[in-house]
Amino acid sequence: MSGICGNVLVTGSNRGLGLELVRQLAESPSPPLQIFAGCRDPNGPRAQDLRELAQKHQNIIIIKLDTSSEASISEASKAIGPKLKDGCLNLLINNAGVNIPGALADTGEKEMVDVFVTNVVGPMLIAKEFLPYLQKAASQSVQHTGMSCRKSAVINVSTLLSSIEKCHETFTMAPMYPYRASKAALNMLTRCLAEDFKKDGILVMALHPGWVKTDMGGPQAPLLVVDSAKGMLKVISSLTEKDTGTLLDWEGKSIPW
């Protein structure tokens, strides 16, 4: 986890993996200057754990952010901008996501569209909205060469289930059409952003957290959220320009598209 510093934004921070990422960042030996924890309803009951965590760590700033709403994303950017030292955002973790489990018979237009809005459109709009802050961070980083999360990076939380090459291995255990298709689209978004942002020195990659025991992953998942987050942050802190545009898992292993 060493090497992650500056200002960080984590979406979907009120529970599960997002909450644990914020917790481990805040409790690390060299914590970020500011951790912006985005969640849909900061004052609601589902954000109770996040509010308690923020009371313990002054560098955690809870931000109202609904990744399925373009207006909410814009308002979050306006709220965060003035709080950024020198207008720099060093690390953006697009963690917010939804899963509507469904075989083909259970999947209709609404299910597909709702999942795509959160899992693909949301990360795109957030990257677009926060790009000026990421560009500023990259341009003002004089002590770090190349690409890294210490300079400027976007991490999109993807999944092994997004892999088209491995679909024949994983489909039977999880025939989730909206989730799989949306995360495959997120992978393409990641590749596009990586090419687009390369000129600015901004690293962009996709990261699979593993099958994690969360509300989304379910009780049968073999991986504890604390271990997944620890592994993810270790991978994130070690990323260099060779990793931009890639899909890795929480242990740093490459996953085929």
Image (cartoon, rainbow, N blue to C red):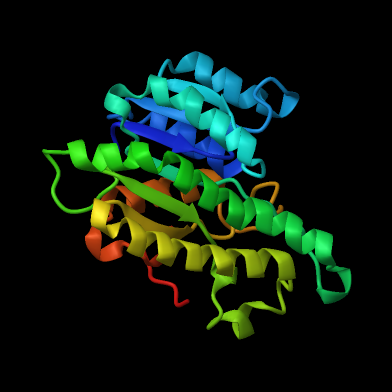
The answer to which of 112 and 209 lies nearer the viewer is 112
Q: Is residue 23 visible?
A: yes
Give coordinates of residue 181: x percent, y percent: 65, 70
Residue at point 32% right, 25% down? 33
Residue at point 23% right, 60% down? 241
Is the residue 23 above or below the residue 159 in the image? above
Q: Is residue 212 visible?
A: no
Asked which quadrant contains residue 75, the reply is top right
Q: Is residue 48 left or right of residue 140?
A: right
Is the residue 18 above or below the residue 46 in the image? below
Is the residue 234 above or below the residue 174 in the image? above
Residue at point 35% right, 60% down? 196
Asked which quadrant contains residue 130, the reply is top left
Give coordinates of residue 155: x percent, y percent: 42, 51
Q: Is residue 174 left or right of residue 131?
A: right
Give coordinates of residue 194: x percent, y percent: 36, 61
Residue at point 52% right, 37% down? 20
Quadrant containing the N terminus in the rendered view: top left
The answer to which of 198 and 160 lies nearer the viewer is 198
Give coordinates of residue 254: x percent, y percent: 38, 71
The answer to which of 118 and 128 lies nearer the viewer is 128
